[in-house]
Amino acid sequence: MEIKRILVSRTDKIGDLVLSIPSFFMLKKMYPKAELIVLVKAYNYDIIRNLPYIDRIIKIDDFSKAELLEKISYFKADVFIALYNDEYIANLAKASKAKIRIGPLSKLNSIFTYNKGVFQKRSRSIKNEGEYNLDLVKKLNPIKFSACYELNTKLILTEENINVSNLYFKENNISGKVLVVNPFIGGSAKNIRDEEYAQILKSVRNKFNSKLNIIITCHISDEERANNLKTLINEENTYIFANGASILNTASIINSADVYLGASTGPTHIAGALNKKIVAIYPNKKTQHPTRWGVLGNLSVDYVIPDENNKTENYKNPYFDNFSKEIEEKITNLILEALI
């Protein structure tokens, strides 16, 4: 059949959407004449709005569930691909009336929804989330996929986005080496404590031979914590970028960094898509491990796994059970090596 319109759904968090960029790129490369429509959460819209190969973006939040279920068939999609599946997305796939419906076959509702589904046990975490997504795209046409394959993870900033960073640097008179750190995450994985970030940043500053600017990025809701962290560091040339607007504002600051430090969170994946040098702090737990949730397509990433030798780690605790001087020194040295 001729494929004229492809509708792809990825309606969860920032990092998940960044790891879906290669799938969007491949679909357009495989079917350049087809209209590519992507369904996302409204807060994620800016992540992909500048990608030239996406023709239309639907913000799932702009409609009630009943309204979108009624209207989804108006798009006359030939293909519906769910990169992430839940009951609502499965219902949207059926309501779309697409002749080809692709999604992960992991739950009972998915078996009755996706007529070209792929059996995936993502909880086994044997590959990157982005690779699991690409397996679904490949199901559409394995031969065409293999012939066209190219891994493209690039996030695109506009001149307007870049101007945000330029203005911020100018207003704060920032020059020289820049380390951007995003220490606050949404709780989907373990992290080190704010005090431990402060120890690392003070250690890096003390050991770096020349001027080093540290920019703490955060959502505006974490601004108070960022200010407390800045107080703990207690050094000059430490700044806060608290963002309450487009996520691409934060991306523009990260893009201006020499090195990025963060945990398993959306901004870390943004740094990866911007091809920055990264030091990333991840847990050893299989479903949170960098094998599954690490940065895709960027070879300049050093992972530090504080619990890799702790078989009794309590994963109900949002912070690592142990933060030793050895871990602090390891993270510090990796940052210093990346800054050279």
Image (cartoon, rainbow, N blue to C red):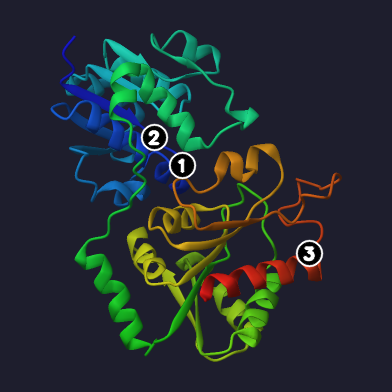
Residue 225 showing in the rendered view: no
Q: Which mark is residue 16?
A: 1
Mark 3 nearby-residue class (10 Å; few <14, some 14–19, many ≥20):
some
Cβ atoms under marks 3 and 1 closer than 8 Å: no
Mark 2 = which residue? 10
Query: Label 2 sits on what residue type?
Result: Arg
The percent coordinates of residue 84 (x first, y second) are 45, 30
Nearest to N terminus: mark 2 or mark 3: 2
Give the answer, above or below, for where 273 lies relative to 219: above
Nearest to N terminus: mark 3 or mark 1: 1
Mark 2 nearby-residue class (10 Å; few <14, some 14–19, many ≥20):
many
User: Between marks 2 and 3, how big is the CA–CA gap?
Assistant: 35 Å
User: Between marks 3 and 1, how big is the CA–CA gap?
Assistant: 28 Å
Mark 1 nearby-residue class (10 Å; few <14, some 14–19, many ≥20):
many
The percent coordinates of residue 295 (x first, y second) are 50, 49
Residue found 39% across the figure and 87% down from its top: 175
Question: For the residue labelled by badge 1, is the local secondary structure a helix, a strand or a loop?
Answer: helix
Cβ atoms under marks 2 and 1 closer than 8 Å: yes
Residue at the far right in the pictured view: 312
Residue found 67% across the figure and 67% down from its top: 331
**Residue 103 lies in quadrant:** top left
